[in-house]
Amino acid sequence: MEMFNLKPGRQKSEAEQGSMQGFAFAIRYRAFAVALVALLLSAPAAFASEFRACLGELRSEATASGINPQIFDAVMDGVRPDQSVLDAMDYQPEFTVPVWDYVADLVDDERIADGKAKLAQWGEVLAEIERQFGVDRYVLVALWGVETNYGRITGRRPLMRSLATTSCFGRRQSFFREQLVAALQILQDGDMPPESLRGSWAGAFGQTQFMPTTFQRLAVDVDGDGRRNIVDSVPDALGSAANYLSDAGWRSGEPWGYEVRLPRDYKGPSGRRDRRPLAEWTRLGIRTIDGAPLTGDGRAALFLPADEEGPAFLVFRNFDAIHSYNPSESYTLSIAHLSDRLRGGGPFKTPWPTDDPGLSRAERLELQQRL
């Protein structure tokens, strides 16, 4: 090109200057594009290399914790990191969906009818679990229904792949490494075969969705076959959930709470952790939803899931026991409400502060079909 043969001292024209700048930009852009492509091509390889190194660390940690290295090698053979697990880590609907939508999704006519059928089907087992652990059967069946739709949806992700991924990448790696070792111990103890260990992205599995360390600590053998199998055994799953709630402080024969009526323009204390004697709540003008005096043993908290505009509840120690299963108030209220519906109770009497109170599963299906 002529512009590269300019004589020293000659002034470049505007056209020549533009050409030079355009060519320089093209060179820089091409270099950037080549570097970007190289980066994109190298990222999966670097990701895989980092994962292989991490597996070596996990093997050493597992062996130090008593896991047979042959079991680790057999389980981890061919395991690859799962990016979708890391993506799922940032999406938890119980903390992002409005409470009325969340409850409407989990407490609908279908789940209530299914739960009543399960109560009849497993009545003898539930009676024995109630006798042994003192936990209300309606709450157990409600928890079963909310966690996995009565065992129908337990999660499809291979547990070892999910836990290996979260043990090597993302937040809380030390926590997930503990879960991985506990899951390996479940296999080593023979409670369940590897193909049964499928669950959520976080590693919860079984009909009542235990984390592996929780399983190791609180799972029980109710059906008497010598194994604790919360995947294939309904008695073991329900009994283990009962043992969990009992360990969390469940008080036999006491309610989780009940709906109440606030005085007009109430601006007093509230919050699940602010527990006060019933006499104080009475002094503040709070009554049951039907206007009767408050009842219950011990201290209670005023729970306002949608502030003062929606349903209000006095909640007792058993509400906290349910909350310990999953630290979400929307989740806890859903189980508590479903247990009341299974017992024969009705919907909340105070409406939610919205013109769109949420769709049940049947209503969502109908809407999808119409669309």
Image (spheres, rainbow, N blue to C red):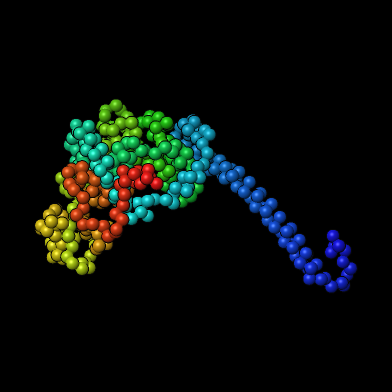
Taking the view exactly as shown, the residue that stands out farthest to the front is 370
x then y, percent, for residue 163: 45, 41
Q: Which of 282 and 9 is in front in this view?
A: 9
x then y, percent, for residue 197: 40, 35
Q: Which of 150 and 360 is in front in this view?
A: 360
Image: 108 above or below 310: above
x then y, percent, for residue 223: 26, 29
x then y, percent, for residue 248: 26, 47
Question: Does the rendering let one see residue 364?
Answer: yes
Image: 44 above or below 184: below
Q: Which of 254 and 370 is in front in this view?
A: 370
Taking the view exactly as shown, the residue that stands out farthest to the left is 292
Residue at x 49% of width, y 31% of height: 74
Query: Which image quarter: residue 225?
Result: top left
Question: Does the rendering let one see residue 213?
Answer: no
Q: Give the left or right position of residue 83, taking residue 35 as reference.
A: left
Q: Nearer the viewer, residue 183 or 104?
A: 104
Residue at x 47% of width, y 48% of height: 87
Residue at x 15% of width, y 57% of height: 289
Taking the view exactly as shown, the residue that stands out farthest to the right is 7
Residue at x 44% of width, y 49% of height: 89
Labels in figure, total: 0
The quadrant of the rendering that contains the N terminus is bottom right
Q: Give the left or right position of residue 200, taking residue 41 as reference.
A: left
